[in-house]
Every structure is written in structure tokens, then in C-alpha cells.
Amino acid sequence: MSIEKIDQIAHHVRRRLERVFEEAGAGDAPVALQKPPRPELGDFAVPCFPLAKTLRTKPAEIAASLAARVTPDEVVVAAEAEGGFLNLRIDPALVIRVTVGQVLAESDEGGYGRGTAAGKLRYLVEYSSPNTNKPLHLGHVRNNVVGLSLCRILAHVGHEVCPVCLVNDRGVHISQTMLAYQRWGAGRDPEAEGTKGDRFVGDLYVEFGRHFDQELDAWLESLEGLARFQSWKETRATRLKAGPKGKTEAPLDESALRKTFRSEVKDEYFNTLSPLGGEARELLRRWEAGDEAVRDLWGRMNGWVYAGFDATYRRLGVRFAKVYYESDTYALGRAVVEQGLERGLFRRLDDGAVVCDYDTLGLRGVQTPYKVLLRSDGTTVYTTQDLGTALARHDEIGFDRQIYVVGDEQKHHFAVLFALLGLVRPALADACHHLAYGMVNLPEGKMKSREGKVVDADDLMDEMATLAAQELRTRSDSARAHAVESGDHVEIDRRAEVIGQAALKFFLLSFNAASTMTFDPAKSIDFLGRTGPYCLNAYARTRSVLAKAGGEPARDLQVLRALGTEREQAAVRALQAMPGEVLRAAETLDPSKVADAVFEVARAFNQLYTDKDGHPIIGCCDADLRAARLLLTTAVGHALRTGLSLLGIDVLEEM
């Protein structure tokens, strides 16, 4: 028997146990192989509880009976019962040889664990989805990091992946920045001012908001505004008095009432009374009418933003196979809705709006029993646009699965969208998935926010690189001396950028995407914690060891027989687990599983590396043991490089 792959070991064990189950009277009961909670229990654990009903015996007795039936062979060296579990121990020499051999072989073929998916699917992954009225911010960073890693993981296990981006480049918010430029920025140019284009435009958006707030506050103090406020207060009091029996609400003081009123009336004021709002809406109308001057300004300002986005994307390592623009796609869904109306899937209200009843979609409405798809004036809504875009993508590119990486506040939107897709094209009923991610918070005072509310992606990455550079200079006397002597900080800055990116990405990916998290910059940069820099350092250590040894050793797997200590086996176990975790990450769309696996490999190697007395590598006197540890070091380096790449992280040959 020749076993060359890790999964062949599990296959051999499963086949043996199937025969043992049959001999014990369990028939064709499935063999569930699990990882024991502690390494000393063995390599595989088989729960015997599901067999109790069939064999009419206590699980502990079943485990003992099965253990007695498992005789050692060239793979399984021991079988023991532990409570209701049958624990199996695999020949450690075989595990080491197969694992290290597989890592080395597959690293020459595109990366360890490549192509492990059972079937090849075509995935279309939409992520990033920025607006052209502001630069990318911290929330976008998490979106991009998750989307990038997911695409790499899916492709690594064997799927075909097409990453796409939908840019929100039209609408009244874009018109606001155009109006701000006309009023307060005409003649200015971001390149001439040495400013990134997306930040330049984002500042204009903030400027519009500042002037609009001033206008709104002035209206609130006008006779009309004060009268509206008084009427609102009376209506509110009447509504509360007539509310459900037993309902209570803490009384609000005048200041709190005014704040609540301002919040509630803001959109209405913008859309009906605001002079600035009227000018912005007029710009949007002229844009939709194809006004040449407005379109020219729109194109020029969006061009500035795209140049800024591209710079940020390059820094993050993000690339898209195709970028969609809402200005091209916003009308795509109209024909779909009109066809659905003809087919009786949708209905028209008395005011002319076209809607789909939530009952038809199997959903519950939030405010109304139906979802509006075309407004009474014939214009589309976001759901209609996304519906048309999804169908156009399927017709143009084709996909088996489409993943939307979008914040969790859009859960209802995507539930409606996917139900509509299944209604108009049943083949797509289960083809789409919303990978929702939670909010990212920052510890108070840790990072500087450009607007006081939103942390720009560029500011965040700059701060991470600065923290990394400070850490490098603190930790490395030689690096600091070199920088001082040469007067050239380029190399430290290069390494700091890689380390800062690793810290940021690894921290964000260490959490399941659905969780709300607090990003702590100082914690993320810790070289001794569960961090990207820690994993980078482990990789750099493998390269340092091999450089001192004269390069990677000859791949004579027979010398691996010399390995066998608990720390050596722990490193091998971490390597052995990695392909399965990558595959599970692809199946569950959860990159955090890869981050966990990478950290476990790094930690196991670091424990081996730092044990200079018990586990010397370069200084090992036994030639075979030295060669074996160098092979293991080589395998660890290849695995770390592969795993970090799946997280979108570059490696450094030395830190």
C-alpha cells in the first residue's frame, strides 16, 4: 500500500472501520471521523453514540468492543476506548512523511492544499461597492479584505472565481458633490493641490453637508420652521396618548425634542424646501436628461475618485475582473419588472407604481405588505437595479453561485432580491448568497478620523505602517543602525508597509465576518500575539534558518524518520490540518478558518524554533536529524506562505 496524501490516511482508516462495524453488527452505519480534543488521545476519534440504538449496547461498551477488533497495521498502530469514543493512533512516522511530502510537492504545483474541492463551480463575488462621493473608509477595508481573501480561497480549492465591483456613481448624493464643486471648488484640481482625487471629492461632500446643515438650522429657527416644530410636538403628544395601553415613554426635554424633530424632518426638508436640495435635484435631472455640461463635470469628478480608489486598491492588493457602474445598470431591471407584470408576478397600484407582494415572495414586509419595484413616476429602486444587474451578469458571465459581500444592515434587501430572482428565474432561486459582515469599531482615541466620524482607509493604512516602522526600529538594533548609517529609510518603510498590511488584514480576518468587532491597531501589530506580524515573523524565521543552512535541503523524505518529539509532531499536526481548514473556509465562506490554521502552524513552529537546547536546527549534531528538521522547516515556510497569501498578505524573507 502506498499512501502519499493526507486524505488517503483518513480514507484507509474509514475503510478499515467500515469492515469492523460490519463485523460488530452495525451494518453500513457511517463512520464519523473526528479530531480528538487532545493530541494524547490519538489522531482520530469515532463517536459510538449513534450505534447504541442499533447494537442495543452502551456507547462505552461499543467503543471497547470495536477497539478490540482493530488490529494494528502499517497505518493504525493503536486503538483505545475512551468513554463513548473509539480513539485511533496513526503511525507518527507515516504522518510526518506523508504530511511534509505533500506540503513540499504541492508547493511546487501552486500551493499547499490546492484543488481540494469535490466539484468545480463558477463563483461570481461582488465586493467593495463604493460610492463616488467619498474615499474608501474602515468599513470598506473590512469589505475588501474579506472579499479578496474569499476569492483567493475559493480559487485555491479549485473553483473558478470572477471578482466584480459595482460602483454607485450616480444619484442625488453624487449631485451634491457636483454642486459643492460648482459653488465652492470651481477651478480647483486635486492633482494641482497634491491631494488624492477621492479625498478631494469627499471633502466637497463634507462641505455640502456643512452648508446644508447651516441652511436647515436657519430654517428651523424661522417662523415656518418653528410652526412646523410646534405642530409636530402636538401631533407627537396626541400619538403617544392614543398609543397602546400600558405603553410608557420617558418625557423628553425641549432640546431633545428639537433634536428628534430635526432628524425626522431633515430628508423631507431636503426634498421639498431646501434651496441646496433643489439645486442638487436639478443637477440629477439634467444628468438623467443627458445635459452635456453636467455629464462632463460628472465624468471629470468621477475620474478623480477612480484614480484615488485605484491607489487604495493597489495598496490592498485588490483587483476586479470587471467593474460595473450604476450609471450603466440602474435601468436594467425595468424590463424585467414589466415582463413580470405581464406574467402576473407583480401588480400595479392605483398610483401607477408596480409592486410585488411579500406574501408572493414568502417574506414579511417591514412597513408595507409589498415591495415597490417601479415608483409611480416609472423610476426604478435599488432592488430593481440589483435584480436587473444579477440577471444581466448571469446572461453575460454565467455563474453557479453569486456572493454579495455587503454589510449586515442590508439583510432584508438581499432577502427580497434573492426571492425576486427565484420568482422571475427559478433556476437562480438558490444561486445567490449574502455574505454579511458586521460593523468595525475603533477604541476611543486610537485612530485619527478625518471627519470625526469615518476613518479613511488611507489614513488607517498609513497609521498601521507607522506603527509597524516604530516596532521595527524598537525591536531591531541592526535595522535602526542600518537606517541611520545609510540615511535611507526605504527598506524599513517597505517592510513596515508589508507588516502593517499583515496586521490589518489578519486582525480583520481573525473574526467571522458576521461579527461586530473592535479593531485595535496596537494589538494587531503585536509581534508576540495572535497577529499577522507574528505569522510573518514565523515565515521569516524559516527563511533565515534555510539561508544559514545554505538553502533548502535535498528532498529525501526518508530522513524524516528521525523526527518524533511532541513539538515536531505538533508542527506536523498543524500542517496536516491546514488543507481541511482551507476547504471548510471555502465551503462556509469564512476566511477566519484560514487565519486560525495559519496561526496554528506559526505557533507550532515558533515553539520548536525557540527551543534552542531541546530542538536545535542549524546546530543539530545528528546529520539525519538536522536534515529532517530542515525539511520540516521548509514545509512550514511553504505552508505559511500559501496560507498568508490566501489572506491577501505578502511575506517578507526577513523582518
Image (cartoon, rainbow, N blue to C red):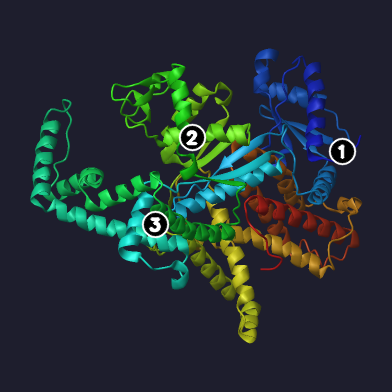
Q: Quadrant of the C terminus?
A: bottom right
Labels 3 and 2: the sequence-earlier one: 2
Residue with the most extreme bottom position = 485
**Residue 609: mark:** none
Q: Quadrant of residue 613?
A: bottom right
Type of residue at label 2?
Leu
Task: Tell me residue 176's x, y (percent).
Answer: 34, 53
Location of residue 457 with respect to 72 vertically, above or below: below
User: Mark 1, residues whose alpha carbon is within 10 Å: few (<14), some, or many (≥20)?
Assistant: some
Type of residue at label 1?
Ile
Is residue 509 in view?
no
Is residue 168 in view?
yes
Residue with the most extreme front position = 292
The residue where tag 1 is placed is: 3
Tags 3 and 1 touching, CB below 8 Å: no
Query: Which residue is found at the position 82% from the left and 31% from the top?
Result: 12
Q: In this view, does 141 lie to the left or right of 159?
A: left
Task: Tell me residue 65's x, y (percent).
Answer: 76, 22
Task: Tell me residue 320's x, y (percent).
Answer: 60, 49
Type of residue at label 3?
Val
Mark nearer the viewer, 3 or 2:
2
Report how far apart the C-alphas of labels 1 and 2 lie in the structure. Answer: 54 Å
The residue where tag 2 is placed is: 332
